[in-house]
Image: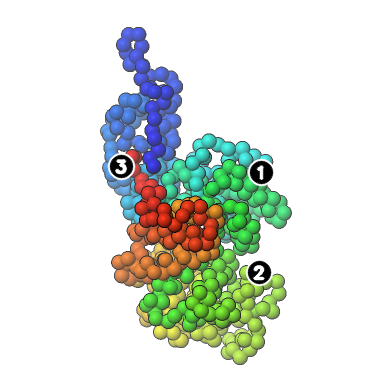
Amino acid sequence: MPVPISSPAGSACASDTHGRPDIAPHAHAAARALLGDPLTNKGTAFTEAERDVLGLHGLLPPHVGTLDSQIARRRRALEGMADDFHRYAFLRELQDSNEVLFHALVQHDLPRMLPLVYTPTVGEGCERFSEIWRRPRGLFLSYPNRDKIADILADPALDRVKVIVVSDGERILGLGDQGAGGMGIPIGKLALYTACAGIHPAEVLPILLDVGTDNAARRDDPLYVGWRNPRIRGGDYDAFVETFVEAVVERFPNVLLQWEDFAGKNAYDLLERYRGTLLSFNDDIQGTAATATGTLLAAIRHTGVPLTEQRVVLFGAGAAGSGVAEMLVRAMMDEGLSEQAARARLWAVDRDGLILSDIPRLPDQQVKLARDAAEVAGWTLSGSHQIGLLDTVVNVRPTVLIGASGQMGAFGEAVVRAMAAGCERPVIFPLSNPISRAEAHPADLLAWTDGRALVGTGSPFGVEGVTQVNNVYIFPGVGLGAIAAGALAVTDGMFMAAARALGDLGSMGNAAGLLPPIDRLRDVAQHIALVVAHQAVEDGVATLVRSVLTPEHIAGLMWSASYG
Ligand SMILES: O=C([O-])CC(=O)C(=O)O
Ligand SMILES: [Mg+2]
């Protein structure tokens, strides 16, 4: 769906009484507005005819370019830069000046561009957001403006919005509280909705709920662009989010909303509170879970050990880790285990060590994962305090080790060698992002296991044979599928269908990895969208019937970057 570029008020050119062409004053303003709006700007690719009609002569250099030549020019500039952070900033600026060119560049070479516009570089983009602030994108809904949310959303420029990604910036990847800088994440995720699921750039809306920050370094930075206040919490926070959700439902009744990078308890509470009111999901809980589950199912094709016989140790039981655990339990139950038998195959280790039921004040999601102290009574332990990751691995002899802790290097040599000693083909997924928070470097995992490990990392490392196990394999397809089916809710079944579809996809020619290569992400999203849309029908939440939900229907919804 190209954005129509219409001539303002018919034609900009008129003739004065002497027959000289004359450009009406409003046309000058309109011409500048056209170039200043990233959704309509084509830069040097405006044709002669368009320049005539739209009054663009003089504002552009005389050369008329093509999208391909523009890509080549930007590509050369990008490769000449000193580091990825500057490439990130350059691409953000391009997105804010010409969206078609930005998306064409990204789609043209996803393996090169994804790590620049998304994980891992987006992490530094959030940490240094204020430093590279240039132009507004999306909406900052700050606590002091809480009475104005509905007015802000009323902007007619937002009429086409179909997908919102919202964060409050409190748990940005594994980097913690970044306050308003967390906006980099909704922007990055939505760039992938366009790149992978073909959602038009005019239909996406990044939102940052600025409720302050407890990150003193950000607050004390004189350049910080956010609200300089400690985080609002408790009832005031809940009321603020409630106002936000009510305004969204009123303004965009059919929108798909993705909660992203909220801290643990809020992540769970908001998902559960609003999943019945709003077509919504939490990517860190559900997207990560489906990605990890799907990749584990793919790994099982290599190891031959059925899911119901896996022994899984999870390190880090926050929103992402416990989301993975719950989905694995459901997947094992689908394959015939009782809930109790499924839970008996999972051990979760968090900051107090192995989660045991006698640990006081466990968060709700950890209570379900806790083991009975009696179960570990016979374990050989290295110390008398908590049961750490190494003790757990030595005693459990896991077949699968998953990290969602944000703790760099937590999968050390002793842990990994202990695992490899008890298992022929260890499956090891250090999922935490960005690279500075990964539980292990994949090259070390391969070395310590003599190449026997099947390794998947949240961030890209560029190590041969290592799969990137990132939510980008899931959320664009789930979102597109939900939209395609006109779904009223995103069910757990839709995520399970997405996970199984991912596991069944095979590596699409990616000989070394478990999942398809990054340059096939559009095909992945399209396939997952179809399966998810069908599951929406199955679960009774679709407003369209199954017979119209064909691959052609999905493909027809996907926009590709071109000037059209
Ligand atoms: O953004 C990513 O790469 C994956 C993710 O959701 C997270 O780490 O929070
Ligand atoms: Mg996230």
C-alpha span from label 1 to label 2: 30 Å
Task: State yes or no: Cβ of the residue under disc 1 lies below 8 Å from any atom of ligand 2.
Answer: no
**In the image, what residue occupies the spot 59% across and 80% down?**
340
The residue beneath circle 3 is 67
| Residue 408 place in picture, x, y as percent | 51, 69
Q: Nearer the viewer, mark 1 or mark 2?
A: 2
Question: Which part of the image, by quadrant, shows the C terminus?
Answer: top left
**Along the viewing direction, whichever of 159 and 421 lies nearer the viewer:** 159
C-alpha span from label 3 to label 2: 52 Å
Question: Which part of the image, by quadrant, shows the N terminus?
Answer: top left
Secondary structure beneath dot 3 equals: helix
Q: In this view, which residue lies farthest toward the bottom?
A: 378
Task: State yes or no: Cβ of the residue under disc 3 lies below 8 Å from any atom of ligand 1.
Answer: no
**In the image, what residue occupies the spot 49% across and 62% down?**
538
Secondary structure beneath dot 1 equals: helix
Which amino acid lies under the numbered mark 2 shown in the image of this protein?
Asp
Mark 1 in CB contact with mark 3 (< 8 angstroms): no
| Residue 5 place in picture, x, y as percent | 38, 33
Q: In this view, does 39 lie to the left or right of 380?
A: left
**In the image, what residue occupies the spot 71% across and 56% down?**
234
Q: Earlier in the sequence, mark 3 or mark 2?
A: 3
**Along the viewing direction, whichever of 269 and 46 lies nearer the viewer:** 269
The residue beneath circle 1 is 146
Q: Is residue 311 left or right of residue 366?
A: left
The residue beneath circle 2 is 364
Secondary structure beneath dot 2 equals: helix
Which amino acid lies under the numbered mark 3 shown in the image of this protein?
Leu
Q: Residues within 10 Å of mark 1 (few under 14, many from 20)?
A: some
